[in-house]
Image: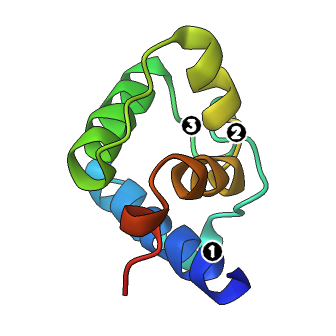
Amino acid sequence: MRGGMQKLIDELKHKMIETLNLTDVTADQIDEHAPLVGGELGIDSIDVLEMVMMIEKDYQVVIDSKDLGEKVFASLSALARYLVEKAPETATRD
């Protein structure tokens, strides 16, 4: 499962760069344990909304409350863990 989790985190890094149009950031520069909101990437509430829509579309996982969103978007690794918990077949596909 560890390899699958790392693959998902790498996939999320690329999707985040694409979704949020982070043109001057590479996947290698994103720390999966760093805070997403208010961290080095400058992600704000509008960016989180875009990420929520991408997650619903790509992983069929709904994040429908502010409290849940704060927990899920604490870091990229927290987001990956949530996706594996809620949609293991989608999040760990090959």
Given the current orientation, which residue lies at the most extreme front position? 89
Residue at the image position 40 percent from the left and 55 percent from the top: 16
> Which of the two discs, 1 and 2, sits closer to the camera?
1
**Residue 54 position in % (x across, y down):** 28, 44
Secondary element at image label 1: helix
- Determine the residue positioned at 56% across, 24% down: 69
In x, y percent, where is residue 27? 52, 74
Callouts 1 and 3 close, C-beta under 8 Å: no
Report the residue marked by disc 3.
Answer: 42
The answer to whether 7 is drawn above or below residue 24 in the figure is below
Residue holding disc 2: 39
| Marks 3 & 2, CB-CB < 8 Å contact | yes
Question: What residue do we see at 64% from left, 12% from top?
Answer: 67
Q: In the image, which disc is placed on residue 5? A: 1
Q: Residues within 10 Å of mark 3 (few under 14, many from 20)?
A: few
Q: Residue 65: image x %, image y %? A: 50, 12
